[in-house]
Amino acid sequence: MPKLREEIDEKYKADLTKIYESDKKWYEDYEHFKSEMNLITDFKGTITKSDKNLYDYLNTYSNLCKRLEKIYIYAHLSSDFDANNSKYQDMVGKAYNLISEFDSLNSYANPELLSIDYSIIKKYISANDKLKDYSHFLENLYRYKAHFLTTKEEKILSDLSCVLNNCEKTYDFLVYTDMKFGSILDDDNNLVELTSSNYNNFLTSKNREVRKNAFIKNLTTYGNYKNTIASLFDTYIKTSTTLAKIKNYNSSIEASLFNDNIDVAIYDNLINSVNDNLSVLYKYFNLKIDVLKLDEMHLYDIYVGLTEESKIEYTYEEAKQIIKNALAVLGDDYINILSKAFSDRWIDVYNNIGKKTQEYSCGVYETNPYILINYENKITDVLALSHELGHSIHSYYSIKNNAYPNYEYTIFVAEVASLVNELLVIFYLLRNSNNDKEKLYVLNNQLDNFL
């Protein structure tokens, strides 16, 4: 049974006081920013007049963005850790509105920049060393030249951004706060509450009735809200396709991939490669049918393991040591940062009522990276923790070694760091375990990762 947020020991909660000492400090900074963000409009009509003007605008814009990101990340994490707290819902709403207001005030800038030829921008960069940190940012901006509208049109879209981007937020509140899934009998015949967080655990149960009941109860609950969910999805699709047309993209897929500079052909190749090799997946399913002695394969049978599940559990403290040992090959500096992640409480460890279930790492330029997990002493939790730490330490290094305009990285790069960490932990467990059942369980878990 998940605990209330206040019942979790503080040492297992992410320390957001490193961002703001208190919610009161957040509100104070929110009000300060709100009163000062109009500074960005002082450059209207002057950005491209000289290299100094360009630098002054970009420097002011960057400094304001860093402050705005800090305001947003505190509200975002607070809400994801405890969505049942209406105060944090209010803070997230305020943060989104502030972003929208700032974007609206700044909506003149990109059309103004793109109104001149990029060759002039390159001359400015050559003439002013301070602009070199912004060279990649500017080069990337000019990729969007065909997709930016007039200043007036961009402002209209900015003003509407809170409305246009609301579907995902509404869906999250529906699923993680409002929806209740009821209770089921677990492997020990105890009546327990089914939640978004523990649902996947039941799908891996060796007891077919347990995973079947969890599956049916979960899908039935979603089914009760199917019209609402379908409406949100329909609105999201229509919004995406309409915005893609307005912005002169050939499709919503092209628009989605453009930010990461990924050709649609790469996306299509990924989908085609999976479809062309489904025979391997079917072979794996047939093996599961034979090994588990199933009459036929159902969706609730897909994630149960082939092996006799190892009863070995890993406490959070044990997981920390395993990860440190496994990643020691990356060097002392890496391990020192890893230790800092644990000691400085970058990680929100355990599940609580109202906490988001999707694990992630996130942070911004002026904060630590933070990790949301829901640790339950399983090997999958050890691997998830190592995975998210890969993202966090990647972010830490990127912030440490890059100026603000250049520290962000795309999802196509991000997964390299996280998956390397995960694989190193898998290799460590296989190499150091004396338990054959544990080794088989690790290997089977890796097969299911491919699934």
Image (spheres, rainbow, N blue to C red):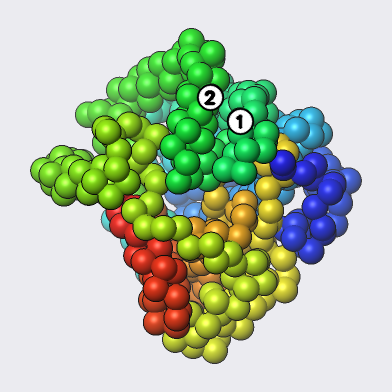
Identity, as a three-letter code, of the amino acid under mark 2:
Lys
Can you see residue 17?
A: no
Answer whether residue 208 is visible to the viewer in this image.
yes
Q: Would you name the residue on which mark 2 appears?
A: 217
Dot 2 falls on a residue whose secondary structure is helix
Q: Is residue 29 above or below residue 45?
A: below
The percent coordinates of residue 435 (x first, y second) are 45, 75
Q: Compare residues 223 and 215 and report the one nearer the observer.
A: 215
Q: How many neighbours does mark 2 have within 10 angstroms: few (below 14), some (14-19), or many (20 or more)?
A: some
Q: Is residue 52 above or below residue 325?
A: above
The answer to which of 154 and 173 lies nearer the viewer is 173
Q: Local crowd at mark 1 within 10 Å, few (<14), some, or many (≥20)?
A: some
Residue 366 coordinates in the image, percent (x, y): 66, 62
Which callout, 2 or 1, points to the residue nearer the camera?
A: 1
What is the quadrant of residue 43 in the picture?
top right
Residue for point 53% across, 83% down: 325
- The residue lying at 40 percent from left, 34 percent from top is 300
Q: Which residue is mark 1?
A: 184
Percent position of residue 158, x then y: 53, 28
Residue 127 occupies quadrant: bottom left
Q: Are marks 2 and 1 in contact (CB under 8 Å)?
A: yes
Q: Nearer the viewer, residue 117 or 68?
A: 68
Q: Amino acid at mark 1?
A: Ile
- Asked whether, in this view, residue 149 is left or right of residue 401, the answer is left
Percent coordinates x, y for residue 269 in the rendering: 15, 45
Q: Secondary structure at mark 1?
A: strand
Q: Nearer the viewer, residue 303 or 225?
A: 303
Q: Relative to 298, is 413 above or below?
A: below
